[in-house]
Image (tube, grey):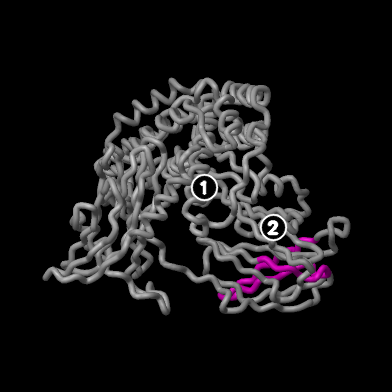
Amino acid sequence: MLLPMIGISGGGGRGARLSTRARRTLLAAGLVLAAAAAPALALTQADRTATREYLRATYQLYRSELTNAPVSRAALVALVQRLERECPHALAGEPKQGEEGSSALKPRARGELRRSELQRSTIESELQAAVSGALEGPNRSAIEAYGKRIAALHWSHQSADALAQALAALREPPPPATAQLCGDVKAWAMSGFRSLSPASRAFAAAQKVQEERQRERFEAASGADTRLPSLTGAAVEPSLRRRIATVLARLLGAVDYVRMYRRVQHALGVPESESERRERRPVLARGRLRDGARFLVRRATGEEGFVSGGCRLGLDVEISRPARTEAVFTAVSSSSFCATETSPRSLSLDCGEATQTITMAVPSRVRTVGLLLSDGQRISSRAVHIARHDGGPAALYVQELHGYEPHPVSLTELDARGAIVRVVRVPAIERCRKRPEPQGPRFVALVHGTAPGGARFAIEGAFVRFGAQTEFSVSAQTGVENGGGVESGSEIAVGKNVAKPNAPKPRPFESQIAAQCPPHPYTLVYGLLRARGASVLARTGEGLVPLTEVPIAAHLHAAGPLFYGVFAAAPSELVVRRRDGSVLYTESLLTKDREETEFCEGYAEP
């Protein structure tokens, strides 16, 4: 079932978080339904036939899941009741994470935070597996039939073939939740939220194997041609795509997943998120905007930090925008402002991807606001009023435009008799301007290797283009057995308007260290070499050891080739030599090695 898997984190204003599997699942839904998202390539008749069968299989699966929705919901209710009975409020004592970035912490504290994050992620995944088992148990045969049907389809574009198989793989069930789910949760809590049970560790290992398999399938799908016309071509079966969106919307409503998952959270003692607290506030006003979007007005609270201390009435405006394609997921945004600040400076112009949202507090006697656009068009809207018993009298103006042109020029406020109260001009500096659409990110696998002790590691590049500007970054992933390891990256941008004023001159070798913590420790040193023709060596106990060079294709606009090395013991120094053997640059790694050691000490479970 294509439903968002919401993390168990609550409180602290963070709200719910999507798991990696959930993000890929939503990506799957978007690629199936967002037909106009990519430029079309030429379609062969075989492509059209394969796409038609792909959509029919998807539609049939959703229909089956909708038929089984009452059984799935009953199973989910039973799961919630079991958690409420067997491990009520087991996570109530979990300490909140600080809002500060991990980069501000000392290495040992970063290690402790990383351990806590991974353990929390494992517990979340176990709960998600239990929820998935309840939801998808009645649909297992339909999902298996769907996978076989997709496996038989082929397109003329190999990347479309690979993507279809990767999307079908997302429907594979996660590793089954352990029989002692509540026992795993209680064990983590009884350890002071510092150590997982053996069953939880085994579950995490099985999940990592599955995620690695899915990652490899998505990498195979990210070939040179990423437009994938066979899956995103709007010309193929638009009516069937609309039926898919309709049945999926009915499915989401029938299961009411989000509310049920919140019951799972609250059964375990996870506090309400800020979004839940906001939803419980009374609606003071509501309305519809010009492009069909709807909005709600609620009273803001001081804890959100939007309303200054002298404001008598702070308001939240939540806008729900209808999907621009057949996708069913509605975009929601919110903004807060002081309703008693009615000067022209209260005007706010929010520039979305393809929308302009205008909000402004207006005097309470204003009844109508006329918006003048740059092409001479005028749009009249009623002001939204807040009654005295809700904190008013107050009024606000809310409007949204699709696209950046024509742009807003001025707002004319009228009272009940049609007399002008004032005219507020929209400053030119506030105008929304179209920016180049980013191309990418495109991920490139640079290195896959095995370190001492048998652990696997990978180095990956990412390329993004913004108009004439390009960015290329490299990052490393380490750790398999114990879920440890440090994910770090070196990011280098080249192109127009990239260099920052007074920025330090880049080093010849932008080095990074990624370390794997015990029981199988090793150190991965890697980076991009800017100096042409040079080489990089690492000083170890046995002397200078050359790093391995990996060329990077010129069209990716990297600063230079990748150099990397894997060591059982961390090197003490890096040496960059010119082609003639002279030393261009040296860098001590002693500080980085000490920080990695302290990180692993903090990461280690007690």
Residue at 79% from the left image edge and 77% from the top image edge: 421
Residue 561, percent from left and from top: 22, 61
Mark whose residue sits in front, 2 or 1: 1
Q: Kindly identify which residue carries mark 1.
A: 113
Q: Closest to the observer: 497 or 606?
A: 606
Instruction: Give above or below for 269 relative to 438.
Output: above
Residue at 33% from the left image edge and 54% from the top image edge: 442
Residue 168, percent from left and from top: 38, 33
Q: Quadrant of residue 217?
A: top left
Residue at 71% from the left image edge and 55% from the top image edge: 287
Residue 395, percent from left and from top: 78, 65
- Residues drawn in magenta: 359-385
For the residue marked with disc 2, what is the amino acid? Glu
Does dot 1 land on a helix, a strand or a loop?
Answer: helix
Residue 504 lies in the magenta-colored region: no
Q: Residues within 10 Å of mark 2 (few under 14, many from 20)?
A: few
For the residue marked with disc 1, what is the amino acid? Leu
Main structural element of the magenta stretch: helix, strand or loop? strand
Instruction: Give above or below for 194 relative to 202.
Output: below
Q: Is residue 79 in view from this perspective?
A: yes
Q: Kindly identify which residue carries mark 2.
A: 304
Does dot 2 land on a helix, a strand or a loop?
Answer: helix
Left or right, residue 590 beside residue 64: left
Q: Closest to the observer: 193 or 90?
A: 193
In the displayed image of the protein, which residue is found farthest to the right?
389
Compare marks 2 and 1 and give the one earlier in the sequence. 1
Residue at 27% from the left image edge and 42% from the top image edge: 451
Q: Closest to the observer: 311 or 198?
A: 198
Q: Quadrant of residue 91?
A: top right
